[in-house]
Amino acid sequence: MRLELSRVVQGCRRGVLTGLGRSGGHSLELPGCLLYTRCASVPHLTHDTLHTLPHLPPVTQISLDSLAEHQEVLEEFGEGVAKFAGLHDTVLFCSLHDLATPRPSGYNTNKTVSVWGSGGRIELSAARYMALQAAIRPDWYQSLADGETPPSASRKRARKAVDRTLTHLDECLSLHHQTQELRGAEIFGVVEGGDVLEERPELRCQLIAGVTKELPEDKPRLLLGVGCPDEVLACVEAGVDLFESSFPFQVTERGCALCFSFNIEPDPESAVLERNGPQSDGERGAKTQDDPEQMTPFEMNLKDKRYRDDFRPLVAGCECYCCRHHQRAYLHHLLVTNELLAGVLLMLHNLTHYCGFFRALRGALESGRLQALRRRILQREGGV
Amino acid sequence: MAASTESGAGMGAAHPGVSAAAPLALRIVAQCPVSKARACDLTLPHCTVNTPVFMPVGTQGTMKGITTGQLEDLGCQICLGNTYHLGMRPGPQLIEKANGLHGFMNWKRNLLTMVSLVELSEVTEEGVKFRSPYDGKEILLTPEQSISIQNSLGSDIMMQLDDVVSSTVTGPRVEEAMRRSIRWLDRCIAANKNPDRQKLFAIIQGGLSAELRRTCLEEMTKRDVPGFAIGGLSGGEEKDDFWKMVTLSTDHLPLHKPRYLMGVGYAVDLVVCVALGCDMFDCVFPTRTAPLASAL
């Protein structure tokens, strides 16, 4: 894996990761997002619906907690999760937790980290963790880490998290080199230490900027658990390269469609279309931090009655399958009748829109128009 | 019974005694030398349907979790919608505004709509009375309204409103339901505003009584409807009673019109009933089985 940075503007890193995957044939543009999955499957989508996406993220994220209880099956299968789950030709990144799923805290010890599967808690030592990674066979994976440092955590608890995580990393690295199945895989170290500072988002970004300053320039920085467009922008400015894509999934789960504009060169025609968009209806979610259930100002709630007879696509000009074939009124109907297709179509749109946002972000970095993009994104919050 | 001929422009002159329902083209491609099985091309407004055909059930304007693009790729030429469900949500006016159910769900091929009602309904000569599951209001669905909704949906094949009793019911109620279904067929034919592009199928009733079935067949085949369904079966009756009613029906149905056996979907039943001369089938079996984590 090689990182080439083509531009660094005000802390934002524009670049490309090349030589990815066991074959080394994949590359990933930065800043970028990974493809979010649950149990190694993109929620709501099958192989054929997934492949209607115009641009698929080249790296797929799976989380170990959803796979831990299938260790024996995976070991017997012996060819890794990518093949087991019938994933397309992709680079596989395995994280410890699915951050979009809430989990109980208070179970980590000096030697172990707990994850929750459908059958309950599974306690992982570094050895068990690495045995699982060997069965999963990812291309990238994060080292075992103690991430239980909510804002309320004491400095002492944060210190402990750091010590444990460092010990886990050493053990993982040493086992990594002894594990045949993980030959050629890349390990991502995890920076812990709590977010003691970060009650307010500006402070969180300061914290992240402080961390990235200490990180080697030539290695990618992945931030888990941040996905809202305005926060992504702020974190890119703080030197982060990679994000998850659980955000569009969470938007889908609440029956919403992403509709924020990231077009910084609006032609007169699309300017008119945007005026007819949802923001002019005065319906904007309140921006609240850290509540995945809560609607954000970047989306429209299609369950709302106003869309009952709205025969426009979700977003004019969007090239996703949903917008090319269906109208808001149909999505409203599918949501009201609890039909499975609602999740499929919303997921297709939201993923497409989210990946489009990252493309626009990279474009803005290249053309030096990041401020224009930021204005465009933040403008939505004011309900313009 | 006289179907309206005003809207039948472009179908040739309507002769007295001949209804405005344009014969829908059924071309028999092959016939089994042993059984009554046949392979046909059924020409419908949106595309030709190759029979025997299983029609998947998309009750509320969608096939469980599948896009219309995928459905097309699966080779589906016709699928079902439910008049009652769609009439309640989103309602006929909205669907009309969306250019019919085809436009609303963006489906380019054929649709068949039927009226399958909730269990707890009360039947009078006027129509079927039931309580709305959404607001608890009492609603009366007449044969005329059932057709009016289906005219708004714009389905290629519409089903008449019939008086269905469970196939395990016996006694005078079976005959009453059969006779009422004939009267309602006439009301449905008269109510159809688009006989040129929306084909109305009659539904043969008569329970498990050969005599009642024969009477129903005799009466309904006098009407010039474009196709026939065999209804009131697949309700838990013995297979021995079931197949006898099917073969009796196909014996009396005209050869050149499609026969639709309602509610049949298990593989063995499909093969047997194709051999007995049925062309079209529907069942919720595959769409209801998949969410229960079962693969056929």
Image: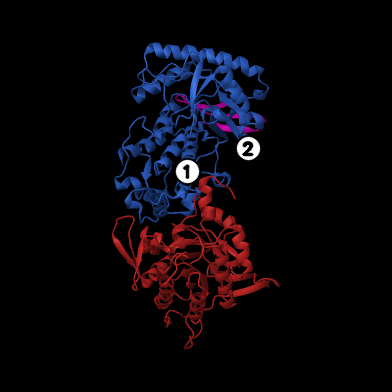
Q: Residue at x 46, y 32 (%)?
A: A368
The residue type indicated by label 1 comes to Met
Q: Residue at x 59, y 68 (%)?
A: B279
Protein chain holding label 2: A
x and y percentages locating residue B104 in the rendered image? 43, 59
The secondary element bearing badge 2 is classed as: loop
Q: Chain A is which colour?
A: blue
Q: Chain B is which colour?
A: red
x and y percentages locating residue A103 in the rendered image? 43, 27
Mark drawn on residue A347 = 1
User: Can I make out residue B193 in this image?
Assistant: no
Quick one: quadrant of the C terminus of chain A? top left
The secondary element bearing badge 1 is classed as: helix
Q: Residues within 10 Å of mark 2 (few under 14, many from 20)?
A: few
Same chain letter for marks 1 and 2: yes
- Residue A14 included in the magenta stretch of the image: yes
Name the image quarter holding residue B117: bottom left
Q: Residues within 10 Å of mark 1 (few under 14, many from 20)?
A: many
Q: What span is in magenta?
A: A4-30
x and y percentages locating residue A117 in the rendered image? 50, 29
Q: Vertically, is B157 above or below A163?
A: below
x and y percentages locating residue A338 in the rendered image? 41, 49
Q: Residue at x 61, y 14 (%)?
A: A174
Look at mark 2 in the image and give the residue it sits on: A89
Q: Vertically, is B151 above or below A134?
A: below
| Of residues B159 and B211, the one drawn nearer to the viewer in this rendering | B211
